[in-house]
């Protein structure tokens, strides 16, 4: 009877051990950014009025290298935009939602935002690591503009 139980329990114990090891690996934390790392909107200027229904969003980075998504090197990340939306809560990945959460996964530093309606708009730029988690400490900038 014991050898029969051993035959059934051994794979479960081994599987539990492997599952425990995998679940203890924390992949939710991003690679740390350099102290003082920052990004800022080069275009448009905060508070500007944009003619038409599109605008080119252009960013500059300091203290952090902008690289393609999937790169998990310390001190690196890629841009995301939250358009007229809040950032995700701490510890959550930055989502991709067409028109609202925009992912620049090829190390782009600019993006043409089209289809803007008349009115006030807010765009928040945030740098995420290779797994789309905001780098720690967060590297963000905000721009506000109006489309007449």
Image (tube, rainbow, N blue to C red):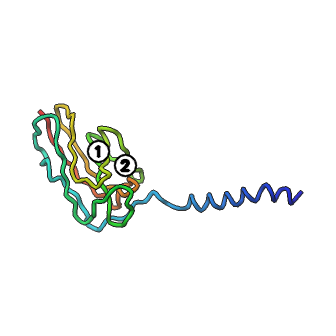
Mark 1 nearby-residue class (10 Å; few <14, some 14–19, many ≥20): many
Assign a secondary structure to mark 2: loop
Estimate the x, y position of residue 89 in percent, counting from the top left: 38, 49
- State the image coordinates of residue 75 (x, y, percent, origin top left): 32, 66
**Residue depicted at x 14% and y 38%:** 146
| Residue 127 occupies quadrant | bottom left
Q: Is residue 143 above or below residue 11?
A: above
Residue placed most toward the observer, 10 or 120 = 10
Apparent side of residue 119 relative to residue 85 in the rendered image (left or right): left
Judged left or right of residue 17, residue 47 is: left
Quadrant location of the C terminus? top left
**Nearer the N terminus, badge 2 or badge 1?**
1
Q: Which mark is residue 82?
A: 1
Kindly report the distance in space between the C-alpha atoms of the residues bearing marks 2 and 1: 9 Å
As drawn, 90 above or below 145 = below
Q: Nearer the viewer, residue 8 or 84?
A: 8
Q: Quadrant of the N terminus?
A: bottom right
The kind of secondary structure element at disc 1 is strand
**Residue 83: % across, % down:** 26, 41
Specify whether 70 is left or right of 110. Answer: right
- Mark 2 nearby-residue class (10 Å; few <14, some 14–19, many ≥20): many
Task: List the residue tagged with mark 2.
Answer: 94
Instruction: Give the residue drawn at x 23%, y 44%.
Output: 123
Pointers 2 and 1 in contact (C-beta within 8 Å): yes
């Amino acid at each position: 009877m014991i050898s029969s139980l051993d035959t059934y329990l051994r794979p479960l114990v081994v599987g539990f051990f492997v599952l425990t090891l995998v679940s203890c690996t924390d992949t939710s934390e991003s690679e740390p950014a350099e102290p003082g790392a920052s990004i800022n909107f080069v275009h448009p200027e905060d508070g500007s009025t944009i003619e038409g229904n599109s605008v080119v969003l252009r960013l500059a980075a300091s203290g952090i290298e902008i690289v393609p998504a999937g790169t998990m090197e310390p001190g690196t990340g890629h841009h995301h935009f939250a358009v007229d939306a809040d950032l995700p809560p701490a510890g959550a990945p930055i989502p991709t939602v067409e028109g609202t959460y925009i992912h620049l996964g090829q190390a782009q530093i600019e993006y043409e935002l089209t289809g803007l309606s008349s009115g006030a708009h807010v765009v928040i730029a945030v740098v995420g690591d290779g797994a789309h988690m905001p780098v720690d400490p967060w590297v963000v900038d905000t721009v506000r503009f109006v489309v007449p």
